[in-house]
């Protein structure tokens, strides 16, 4: 299975600032996924990032708030923009081929003051 | 959109007791996956069920996929303290984006001696 490295593992940020989360995979993958997990809650898909095309965002998530880059088949970034306390969550990237299980990074624990 | 609910939300058992979590989807699924998330960790894939009525076992864990492919269950026999965590089912719809997973609400299991 793929090994996924996510950075930073945690951060405390000021309201109104932005943070970029990096996700590096040890093999080439077509699809990468970004999830949000609010405290004590389930995982909610933010967007699907395919290399060479625009990310596909789920209902309730917009590109201006969560811009995503996917420059190659092993790397993606998610930016959380203009942060507010409501953005305090764990952000997880995962990889998976259609119909197959997904493998997750360790996540980024984000707190906004 | 698709919704995946799990019951119970939380269960506390004594070591040695059995545990079951139930997963229900609002739509028919092509497959269902189960993940375990330890406290402070990321979701880890346990198993995937594809066929209607399928039953799979992993040691003390038994997974079942309903005949209508809209529900599933996970049963743990004789729980151990190592079973502590949150168990999520995740479904892939029979139609639509092939790789998109919708996670269930999760069942948090606490096991005490």
Image (cartoon, helix red, strand yellow):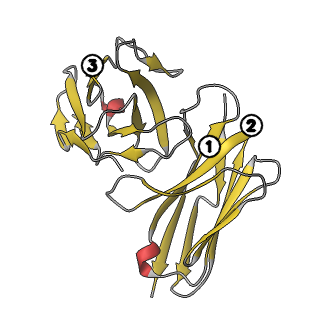
Residue A45 in the image, given as x and y percentages of width and height: 47, 32
Say which of B17 and A40 sits in front: B17
**Which numbered circle lies on residue A81?**
3
Indicate the position of residue A26 as horizontal and vertical percent values.
Answer: 24, 41
Instruction: State the residue at coordinates (54%, 78%).
Output: B59
Query: Circles 1 and 2: CB distance less than 8 Å?
Result: yes
Q: Report how far apart the C-alphas of labels 1 and 2 lie in the structure.
A: 9 Å
Q: Disc 3: which chain?
A: A
User: Are both tags, 1 and 3, on one chain?
Assistant: no
- Identity of the residue drawn at 31% across and 36% down: A88
Q: Depth check: B8 or B64 in front?
A: B64
User: Above or below — where is A107 with respect to B107?
Assistant: above
Image vertical order of residue B24 relative to residue A72, above or below: below
- Give the x, y percent position of residue B79: 53, 81
Rendered image quadrant of residue B64 = bottom right
Q: Disc 1 designates what residue?
A: B91
Bin the neighbour count of mark 3 within 10 Å (Cα to Cα): few under 14, some 14-19, many 20 and up.
some
Say whether residue A64 is left or right of residue B18: left
Residue pointed to by mark 2: B27
In the image, residue B6 sits, relative to residue A4, either above or below, namely: below
> Residue at coordinates 19% horizontally, 43% vertically from top-left?
A10
| Same chain letter for marks 3 and 2 | no
**Res. A30 image quadrant:** top left
Secondary structure found at label 2: loop
């Amino acid at each position: 299975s793929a090994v996924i490295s996510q950075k930073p593992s945690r951060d405390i940020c000021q309201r109104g600032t932005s943070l970029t989360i990096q996700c590096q995979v040890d093999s080439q993958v077509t699809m990468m996924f970004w999830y949000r997990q609010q405290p004590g809650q389930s995982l909610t898909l933010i967007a699907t990032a395919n290399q060479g095309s625009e990310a596909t965002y789920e209902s309730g998530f917009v590109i201006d708030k969560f811009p995503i880059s996917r420059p190659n088949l092993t790397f993606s970034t998610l930016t959380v923009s203009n942060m507010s306390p409501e953005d305090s969550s764990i952000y997880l990237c995962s990889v998976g081929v259609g119909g197959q299980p997904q493998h997750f990074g360790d996540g980024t624990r984000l707190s906004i003051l | 959109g698709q919704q995946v609910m799990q019951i119970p939300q939380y269960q506390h058992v004594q070591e040695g007791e059995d545990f079951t979590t139930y997963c229900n989807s609002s739509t028919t699924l092509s497959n269902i996956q189960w993940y375990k998330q330890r406290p402070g960790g990321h979701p880890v894939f346990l198993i995937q069920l594809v066929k209607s009525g399928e039953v799979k076992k992993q040691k003390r864990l038994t997974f079942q996929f309903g005949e209508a492919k809209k529900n599933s269950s996970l049963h743990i026999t004789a729980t151990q303290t190592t079973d502590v965590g949150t168990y999520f089912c995740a479904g892939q719809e029979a139609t639509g984006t092939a790789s998109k997973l919708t996670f269930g609400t999760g069942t948090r299991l606490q096991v005490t001696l």
